[in-house]
Amino acid sequence: MINTDVAVIGGGPAGLSAAIAAADMGAHVTIIDRNHELGGQLLKQTHMFFGSREEYASTRGFDIANILKEELKERSVEVLLNTTAVGYYKDDGVWALEEGEDKFVKLKAKKTIVATGAMERHLLFPNNDLPGIYGAGAVQTLMNQYGVMPGKKVLMVGAGNIGLIVSYQLLQAGVEVSAIIDAAPAIGGYLVHASKVRRQGVPILTSYTVKRAYGNEVLEGATIVKVDEGFRQIPGTEIDMDIDTMCIAVGLNPLVELLWQAGCKMRYIPQLGGHVPVKDEDYETTVKGIYVAGDAAEIEEATSAMVEGRLAGLNAAHAIGFDNGNYAREKDNALKRLNALRSGPVGAKIRNGLLKLAEEAV
Amino acid sequence: MVSQRLLREGVADETDLKEIIPPDYALDKGPVAVAECFQEIPCNPCSTYCRRGAIVLENINDRPIIDYDRCNGCTLCVSKCPGLAIFVINKNFSEDEATVTLPYEFLPLPKKGDVVITLDRYGSPVGKGKVVRVQNTRYNDKTPLITVTVPKDMIMNVRNIKVEA
């Protein structure tokens, strides 16, 4: 049995920030991550981050991972890699961890922060299971982390930030991007990302969806089709795409299985990405001692995930009784930053979702 | 409000650009920055990296409005813009040539003196230009800046280059 003050499940942007903040307060922290390396999705982010200096704006994601990992080294944090949190025993508050492939260990923490992130959504169309059809995030991992070229001619489905960013990175890797399509009538991601892919010559087709994919053993092409305001396909508007790879970037769902299992009250809030845990202003779920931060709490940007992680870490440590004297100031600062990040027009969706969650929590 | 074309295709139109074209007196002075950042997003490095206080954002979601009394086209903001949305244009590079300085994160990088194809916001070729400067220091942090010559009437059109193999 491992005993710790604060357990952090997931070593991505939210989890790393949570661990650093909790350790700063004086808590002994244990991070659990199923990968070989800490950093989560930051490791494959080769683009510069938005936000302000405090969220490492203008720094590339993988460089931010290195900065956070360096900060971790200077603090009292135990790191369990290749370790997956697979279950929670409610009665005695014990987490079951699988180390490697065949060893199970138990962990008991005074407080736990679940920062498990998200998984990619898929899209329904005939032959959507052909090899060559990937999640866009998966392609980003293959390409930027493992150096594997996923294909030669790509159709990107989804003009949100992930679709736009991965398209740009495919171009940087020398892969042809035939088009970026999106069923919505407008580009969902930042327009600056759209413009930088567009000026590489990649068409962005809004109000288009995938009608079908085809190929014998692997993806050999696809037909896309225009949709009306009700997202109904318009016959006669089909375009055949000669592609060998399709990337699906139609959104993410919070990875919340552990929270379901722990008995946290969950609510379905579309603006937040699906089922998300009800939480209080300290990021504590309805199960006492279990906190949440980052994409597991709601689908948003990595910049806000880092600030949320910080808040959850500060609050979890403080709830045990740790305070280095800066708790109130640090918390206030983090809350202000988070509110600033969400205060503009692009934060409207998150603001509405959080309001709805708060209303439904009652 | 951004244009429908920008929202649907990712290409700014005349109404978007009208708001950000530097005034004539600024263009006459020499190099100046143009921020093609038309959407209020939470981001402020252009402001934090400007040493002349030419871009001030009161709220992190504000759009960058460049103060042309202060901007001298130094390029410090260009490689720090996470959206790669800032360009430096110099209408008075020479008697008959202007230049555009743009962020270029592709290989191979052109060298000073190379002739490259110039592209517009659609990525369509609009001419050829000579590379007069390549900035690729540690400060640029893998976002090199290429300064390329363009005809004087193309400073608001050329926004990318293509390096021929």
Image (cartoon, coloured by chain):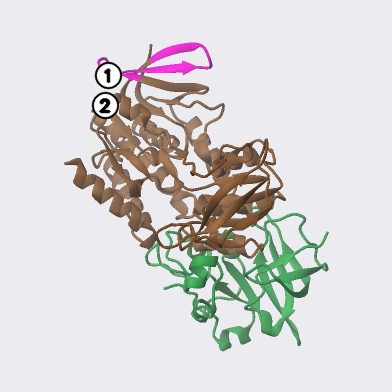
Chain colours: A brown, B green
Q: Determine the secondary structure under disc 1.
A: loop
The Cα–Cα distance between marks 1 and 2, rounded to whole angstroms, is 8 Å
Q: Earlier in the sequence, mark 1 or mark 2?
A: 1
Q: Is residue A104 magenta?
A: yes
| Residue visible at 51% across and 81% down in the picture | B18
Magenta stretch: helix, strand or loop mostly: strand
Quadrant of image for the C terminus of chain B: bottom right
Q: Is residue A85 magenta?
A: no
Q: In this view, does A217 lie above or below B124?
A: above
| Residue visible at 55% across and 81% down in the picture | B22
Q: Determine the secondary structure under disc 2.
A: loop
Residue A155 place in picture, x, y as percent: 62, 51
Q: What residue type is labelled 2?
A: Gly
| Residue visible at 22% across and 46% down in the picture | A358
Residue A180 place in picture, x, y as percent: 58, 56
Depth check, mark 1 against mark 2: the one in front is: 2
Q: Name the residue under label 2.
A: A263
Q: What residue type is labelled 1?
A: Lys
The numbered mark at residue A90 is 1
